[in-house]
Amino acid sequence: MKLSRLRIADQVVPAIMDELGHWHSLASLIPDIDSSTLSKLQQLSLVDSDIAQLPAIERYDSFAPSINHVPVLLCAGLNYKDAAHAMGQMAPKEPVLFLKSTAAIAGASDVIQVSQETLQLDWEVELAVVLSDELEDATEEQSLAAVFGYTIMNDWSERNWQMSAAAQWSKGKSKRGFAPLGPYLVTKDEIPDPAQLQLTLTVNDQVKQQGKTQDMLFSIAQLLAYASRFYRLPAGSVLATGTPAGFGASLTPPQFLKAGDHVCASIEGLGSQSQIAVGGTP
């Protein structure tokens, strides 16, 4: 299933895409796409004939975050060898994890704010994993079984805040809008091998990042099992799995966003999200 949450006027409607790429409302079946409805969606196992019977959505205004009420937004840092080397660091021997504020979650086409305080605003295209079941002290096999599906996250970062004298990753990555999720939430049955996906990010139509998930240092199963040793991950939690080289801080010289820049992040099978950097404050 290819799911989304569509903004229509002042409402957010849970939606599913049919085989022709048209959206249909799920509002008669579930109130929203969140931790409380993921299991029901799995049980429904909607096929094309079922989807065709649901109300068609003729128009919508934008994409809301692909899942609502995320309890934990966990991220893996330095999980691509080329990214670690580009930052002058050795590849880590165990996963590097940090929490990102769930208040930073935004829609796939929401603008990103640039102000006098965001001097080093940076991009990171990442494969994000959504859980349908809780994980705690889980094995790799149990971790994979708990995966509902996948979406895109751009791990926006203010490097000056992140890498200041009192370096704090969460501080530099949790501003409003710094975690756009979407446009789609794609169930795992539609992604046969999440370790073989192409990631691409462009800034003003110039390719900055290009990599494959097969280059991750730690697999999805390894990340989830490791994380579950230290965190309780309730259903609806999201794990962002890291980014390849090509983000602004890894370039020579470093490059950061300015007002007017257009960023497009894409992952094979998961669509594309697009943000424009605008000046001012929210």
Image: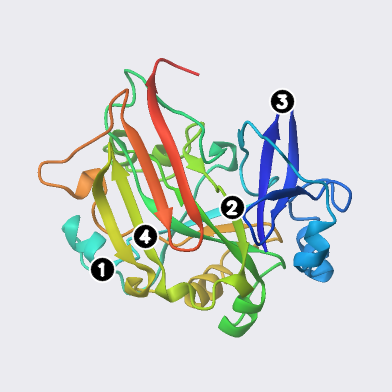
Q: CA distance from mark 3 to mark 4?
A: 32 Å
Helix, strand or loop at mark 2 = loop
In this rendering, would 273 be left or right of 163?
right
- Location of mark 3 (residue): 9
Taking the spot 42% from the left edge, 41% from the top edge, the residue there is 173
List x then y, in percent, for residue 165.
Answer: 26, 38
Residue 237 showing in the rendered view: yes
In this rendering, would 127 be left or right of 211?
right
Q: Which mark is residue 184?
A: 2
Mark found first going from the N terminus, 4 or 2: 2
Q: CA distance from mark 1 to mark 3?
A: 44 Å
- Location of mark 4 (residue): 199
Mark found first going from the N terminus, 4 or 1: 1
Instruction: Quadrant for the N terminus, please.
Output: bottom right
Q: How many C-alpha atoms fall within 10 Å of the one at disc 3: few (<14), some, or many (≥20)?
A: few
List x then y, in percent, for residue 26.
Answer: 80, 50
Q: What type is the residue that disc 1 sits on? A: Lys
